[in-house]
Every structure is written in structure tokens, then in C-alpha cells.
Image (tube, grey):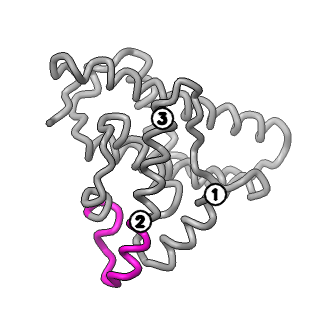
């Protein structure tokens, strides 16, 4: 399922989430946990839904996306891609989606039980700080459409993408030892 299809499904279902935020949430959550938990997705991504048939369809799609994320974020080939609007969309729309993705990612980390970022490596702490900064951006103020703006945006996406992979690696290297990352189990 691509960005547009998932976004339409979530909007039509009235979930209150958008595709980028949902994907970011899954990436953040799966940085800590390797298990795809349908009940968790229902609780945190679909809790506002009353239409059970639509909820079941959303949950099916999100679970499939989570399985894909779980495989790609752990891939040695670095195949994880952020689920964002395609390059034909205006930069302001793609920027808004990146902001939503970062918000979702940080929420996913929190729901997964990460409680103490100070225990992360310097690089991961810096990434988390940068994600918070991205969340505070105003996408309406990003209206450039030149090559320079596109190149900067592409670099930012790559930084966030590789940061998510790095955080996943770090979480899994230490998760089997002591609880040094402050992850609640």
C-alpha cells in the first residue's frame, strides 16, 4: 500500500491519523519491539473508530505495513523508506508529512516504553533532538520549489531514514543485556 492509498483509507475511516504519522509510529515502535501486535495498533492508531468493518480493514492494512516495516528496518540492505507523498507533491505537503512522520516516530518510541533518552548513544540522542526540532517546524512556511530546497529536503529524509535504522540497531544491541536504555518491559 502506498502513501496515498493508506492516507485515503485512514481519512475515510476517521482515524485521526495520517499515513506518514502511522508509518512513523510503526517505525518508532518497531525500533524497540520486533513483534507486530494488532491489538496495540487498534489501541493507539484506531481507538477513535466506531465502524467495526472499517476498523478491521484499517487494522489489516496497518498490520501488513507493520510486517513490512519490521523486515525493512532490520534489513542489512537498509531498505527502509519513509512513507511520504511522492516527489510530484508540493514540497510543503511533503514537509508536513515528514513532520507527521517524526511525530509518529517519537510517539511510537514512547508507547514502546523508551523512558530515558540519556542512556542512548550521542548519535541517537542527537537524532531524537533533531526529530523534536522537525516536529516544531511549520510546513506552511516551506514553500520553495527549487533544486536547492529539493536537495535539502532529500538530505533531511535520508538523515531521518538512516537515523531510524541506527536507533533500531542500537536498541537491539542493548535490549538483550541490561535495561540500560530505560525500556519498560
The Cα–Cα distance between marks 3 and 1, rounded to whole angstroms, is 30 Å
Name the residue tied to disc 3. 73
> Please, what is the dominant secondary structure of the magenta stretch?
helix
The Cα–Cα distance between marks 2 and 3, rounded to whole angstroms, is 20 Å
Q: Residues within 10 Å of mark 2 (few under 14, many from 20)?
A: few
Marks 2 and 1: CB-CB under 8 Å? no
For residue 185, side relative to residue 147 (left or right): left
Q: Position of residue 42 (x, y in %)?
A: 30, 64
Q: Secondary structure at mark 3?
A: helix
Give the magenta part as a residue range. 43-59
Q: Position of residue 160 (x, y in %)?
A: 54, 34
What residue is drawn where x is 39% and y is 41%?
A: 28
The Cα–Cα distance between marks 2 and 1, rounded to whole angstroms, is 33 Å
Quarter of the image for residue 62 reads bottom left
Q: Residue 137 or 73: which is nearer the viewer?
A: 73
What residue is drawn where x is 52% and y is 60%?
A: 19
**Numbered mark located on residue 85 in the image:** none
Quarter of the image for residue 2 reads bottom right
Among numbered discs 3 and 1, the one appearing first in the sequence: 3
Name the residue tied to disc 2. 60
Is residue 106 positioned above or below 121 on the image? below
Is residue 140 positioned above or below 114 on the image? below
Name the residue tied to disc 1. 140
Asked whether 46 falls inside the magenta stretch, the response is yes
Amino acid at each position: 500500500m502506498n502513501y496515498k492509498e493508506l492516507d485515503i483509507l485512514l481519512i475515510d475511516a476517521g482515524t485521526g491519523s495520517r499515513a506518514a504519522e502511522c508509518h512513523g509510529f510503526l517505525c518508532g515502535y518497531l525500533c524497540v519491539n520486533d513483534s507486530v501486535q494488532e491489538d496495540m495498533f487498534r489501541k493507539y492508531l484506531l481507538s477513535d473508530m466506531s465502524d467495526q468493518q472499517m476498523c478491521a480493514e484499517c487494522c489489516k492494512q496497518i498490520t501488513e505495513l507493520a510486517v513490512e516495516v519490521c523486515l525493512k528496518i532490520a534489513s542489512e540492505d537498509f531498505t527502509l523508506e519513509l512513507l511520504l507523498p511522492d516527489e510530484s507533491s508540493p514540497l510543503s505537503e511533503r514537509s508536513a508529512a515528514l513532520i507527521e512522520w517524526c511525530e509518529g516516530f517519537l510517539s511510537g518510541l514512547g508507547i514502546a516504553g523508551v523512558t530515558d533518552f540519556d542512556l542512548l548513544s550521542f548519535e541517537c540522542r542527537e537524532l531524537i533532538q533533531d526529530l523534536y526540532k522537525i516536529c516544531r517546524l511549520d510546513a506552511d512556511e516551506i514553500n520553495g520549489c527549487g533544486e536547492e530546497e529539493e536537495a535539502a529536503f532529500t538530505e533531511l529524509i535520508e538523515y531521518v531514514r538512516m537515523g531510524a535504522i541506527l536507533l533500531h540497531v542500537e536498541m537491539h544491541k542493548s535490549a538483550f543485556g541490561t535495561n540500560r536504555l530505560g525500556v519498560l518491559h
